[in-house]
Image (spheres, rainbow, N blue to C red):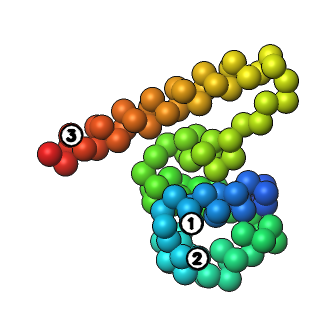
Amino acid sequence: MHVRRQVSSELSAQLVEYLLGSLGKTQDQLSEALEVSPTFISRVRSGERSFTLEHLELIEQLVRKPLGVILLAANPPKSPNKETTKIQKLAMQMLREADSAIASSRKMARS
């Protein structure tokens, strides 16, 4: 039996908004890149549908960044209290540094 695990509809909708903004694509272009219908993207955007883990893999390939970086960019952490703020800032800094290192590595590989 094949189980399709889904991401929350709220996070899925945030991902669509992030992808549309960061990639500069239309819903139709995004749907083509993710191999889904434009209607599916529209429903994800409105919270009616959710991405599956398979979609997340395609998103990671499309954006060419680690999934953790994509998820944090799409849904930045909110500071519920001062105790977690320092940890969240450190995690975001580490992810930005990793993202920067990946980008530099790709530029060097193209040269």
- Disc 3 and disc 2: Cα gap in Å? 32 Å
Which residue shows up at 69% across the image and 18% down it?
Answer: 86
The disc at residue 27 is 2
Which residue shows up at 54% across the image and 76% down it?
Answer: 26
Closer mark to the observer between disc 1 and disc 3: 1
Q: Amino acid at mark 3?
A: Met
The disc at residue 108 is 3
Q: Amino acid at mark 2?
A: Gln
Q: Which of the marked residues, 3 or 2, is nearer the chain's N terminus?
A: 2
Image location of residue 22, percent across then percent down:
51, 58
Quadrant of the image occupied by residue 104: top left
- Disc 1 and disc 2: Cα gap in Å? 7 Å
Q: How packed is label 2: few (under 14 Cα within 10 Å), some, or many (20 or more)?
A: many
* Labels 1 and 2 touching (C-beta < 8 A): yes
Which residue shows up at 60% across the image and 45% down it?
Answer: 73
**Mark 1 highlights which residue?**
20
Regarding residue 11, the answer to whether it shows in the image is yes
- Disc 1 and disc 3: Cα gap in Å? 27 Å
Q: Which of the marked residues, 1 or 2, is nearer the chain's N terminus?
A: 1
Near-viewer residue (85 or 29) = 85
Regarding residue 52, the answer to whether it shows in the image is no
Image location of residue 100, percent across then percent down:
40, 35
Q: Amino acid at mark 1?
A: Leu
Near-viewer residue (57 or 20) = 20
Q: Which of the marked residues, 1 or 3, is nearer the chain's N terminus?
A: 1
Q: Is residue 65 above or below residue 56?
A: above
Image location of residue 106, percent across then percent down:
28, 44
Q: How packed is label 3: few (under 14 Cα within 10 Å), some, or many (20 or more)?
A: few
* Labels 3 and 2 touching (C-beta < 8 A): no
At mark 2, the secondary structure is helix
Residue extending farthest to the left is: 111
